[in-house]
Amino acid sequence: MQWHEMNHEQVEGSVVARDLAATWDGALFHRLGAAGLLGLAAPREHGGAGATAQALCAAMAGFGAGGSDAGLALAWAAHTLGCMAPIARLGSEAQRRRHLPGLCAGERVGGWAHDDHTDAPTRASRRAGGWRLDGRKVRVVNAPVGGLFVVTAITGETRSAFLVGRDTPGLSIGPRMATSGMRTATISALVLEGCEVDEQDLLGPEGAGGATFRLVQRWERGCMLAPWLGLLRGALARSVLHARAHREYGVALAQSQSLRARLADMRIRLELCERLLARAAWQLDHQGEDADRDLAVARLFVGEGVTAIVRAAAEICAPQALELGHPLERLLRDLPLVGLLGVRDDVLRSSIAGALLGLG
Amino acid sequence: MHIPICAADQAFAREFSVQCQERIAPLARAADQRGGCSAEGWRAVVDSGYLRLFHAAEWGGTGASGIRQALAMEALAQACAGTFWTASISSILCGKLLHDLCGPQQQARWLPRIVAGESLGCFAATERGAGSDPASYHTTVQRSGGGYRLCGEKARVSNATTADIAVVLARRETTHDPRLCYAVVDLHKPGVVRREQPKLGLQAMSWGRLEFTEVELGEEDVILDASIDQTLRVVEWGQLIQTMCAIGLASAALAASREYMLHRHAFGRPIAHLQAVHARLADMQAELDAARLLAFAAARDKAEGLSVREPIMMAKIYATEMAVRSADRAMRTFGGSGYAKDQIVERIYRDSLANVPAGLPTDRLREFIACAMVGADPWVYPPFDWLTPAGLTLGDDDCESVDFSGATSGWP
């Protein structure tokens, strides 16, 4: 598959260095845009390929299988699911024409700036010709390098969403977060102090903030982990190769029945993750019965599967896998930040339970 | 690529489920406490058409699709796992053995009766001292006049004391002959003794020993040189039975838990409001969804004759162990009430434990999957050696030549 090869040729060669130095490679992102990766699900008339969610996920799983750069997957998710998806689906024709081509091409990097704590939510107050935004978004993926942000803010009794460019006066980017994982991505706070936006920057009607939030949430649950399916295939393959090749004191690792049992469990778990995510993507395309529940179930199960499989792979391939530069060592560090764009697992469980119980 | 269940199949599932809930589920507690499936319960199974779903019209079947078979299996297991096992072992496992491995006389004599629910079948493979390793089975067929004689004993046979006919896995007279044979045995013949083995769950189903003392068999009753490949394909039906039983039980556990947490009050509200309680429901749903997706895909492909060896093994490993976890979660949801026999969960829990070791235990199935991945042989095992992998060898500490008196050493 072309995406698998593209990852291997364009991305994998520099991931160790980019991770060690925590470097963002804008030119690489731009090349992926030029190749069509970033615009897969965007409308054709604005530079995209018009792919369904199912096709998108299949492509991203293929891409993921060609490498081990989880930080790039996170940046991709924030850019395509957090910024491009709301514009494509809720934006006006003018907004789509203005912003989507550049985002598809990777010339501009997009971000999703919402409030993950409500003690100081961002507020939008009316002014002539638009609004004034005040607030602080604590952790925005792609903020340090982003050119356009989808920003949610309270407008009166409701929430609205705005498109805010990096250069808008009153918008500042906080210092980049230093993290142990996802170092090939960039994360920082977004601060809005008297940031003035116009009518044309309102995404959807006033009060569409909730709808925007729910849309991004659905796409994050259905698609964000698609590249991880590919990463996990790689982790499993490495584990199998290691078990076959490695000997300790003359005894092949593959002789260990309990180690073999773990490989079987990794394989089964991955198979289940792939099927749940395929169903979630189908639900994104068809909005069938229990769509939201199926999306939450996929996100919960696959999120846990990612952790379980990467940890098991790292243990099987230890101690080699624990050296800096080894993909499994890096994926281990990336794990805690996988959930950055979504909600905590216990909150996901409550969502699923709420749907089952008809409560809340 | 996700293939959703179509509206027609969903309608079939709803209707079939209604029959199971109205006619079979209400009898489940009594069947569990008394042991055995009642005549009324069996009539309900026959009336539902369950037995006929798995066979072609020429045998009296309805030839349902794999998806419909799976949907029906789940619904019946959800109503009463013991009744589900009784019916499925007979029609599916024994029925498929007759259909796929045995000769036309055996098929004509038994298959229509099994499909109609007039005769009950079973599959007798495991023995008291042997299970996963068929090379160590001792039951044999020997030439006798114009036919054969069957000698030996089978254990842990589902439907043992209630079945009319058994397909028995046997070896040739010389037990070193590796070839498998099947003997189709009318269990009412002289020389057959059956004993019930008391067990933890699936009480609606009989389970026990079959003792064969020089049972006379006709030429046509024995299939020599049974195809290993065909045998494994039929054994997959057994794994599907365990898998779908587990899924039905997990569905029952989830439904019971949901109902209970909505109606049981504590601290002024239904306990469903408590996060620790409803979090379990979410996990039950997620794991059930995962198991169903894999199992239904395998069932669909199997009914179409595609190779499903590894998918079925994976489905069985996951679903059966998942059902035990779900039953445990349900028990925790019910708290002390779940321990009482007047609630459904303790029966679900006991029943769920059967599917993990049944047929081929999940440990063994993991071996098949993993050995294929790493290129190891799942039939050959070296003797126990904990020294070598730890970097030690016998004779490492040559005690005679080392002075441990402590006089000169700085070591503690």
Image (tube, coloured by chain):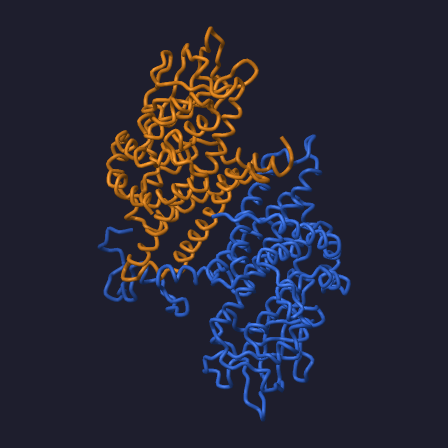
Q: Nearer the viewer, residue A23 or B126?
A: A23
Q: Is residue A81 above or below residue B57?
A: above
Q: Nearer the viewer, residue A302 or A195?
A: A195
Which residue sits furthest front? A45
Which residue sits furthest right? B40
Q: Residue at x 58, y 92 (%)?
A: B146
Q: Is residue B220 left or right of residue B50?
A: left
Which residue sits furthest top? A128
The quarter of the image holding the C terminus of chain A is top right
Q: Can residue A357 be seen by looking at this rendering?
A: yes
Tell me the shade of chain A: orange
Q: Is residue A279 left or right of residue A179?
A: right
Q: Is residue B348 left or right of residue B387?
A: right
Q: Residue at x 67, y 74 (%)?
A: B195
Q: Nearer the viewer, residue A284 or B367?
A: A284
Tell me the shade of chain B: blue
Q: Nearer the viewer, residue B227 or B287?
A: B227
Q: Quadrant of residue A349?
A: top right
Q: Position of residue A187 (x, y in %)?
A: 35, 27
Q: Can residue B161 be seen by looking at this rendering?
A: no
Q: Quadrant of residue A259?
A: bottom left
Q: Quadrant of residue B353?
A: bottom right
Q: Position of residue B3 (x, y in %)?
A: 52, 49
Which residue sits furthest bottom? B145
Q: Is residue A75 above or below residue B140?
A: above
Q: Position of residue B131 (x, y in %)?
A: 52, 70
Q: How many marks?
A: 0
Q: Is residue B135 above or below residue B282?
A: below
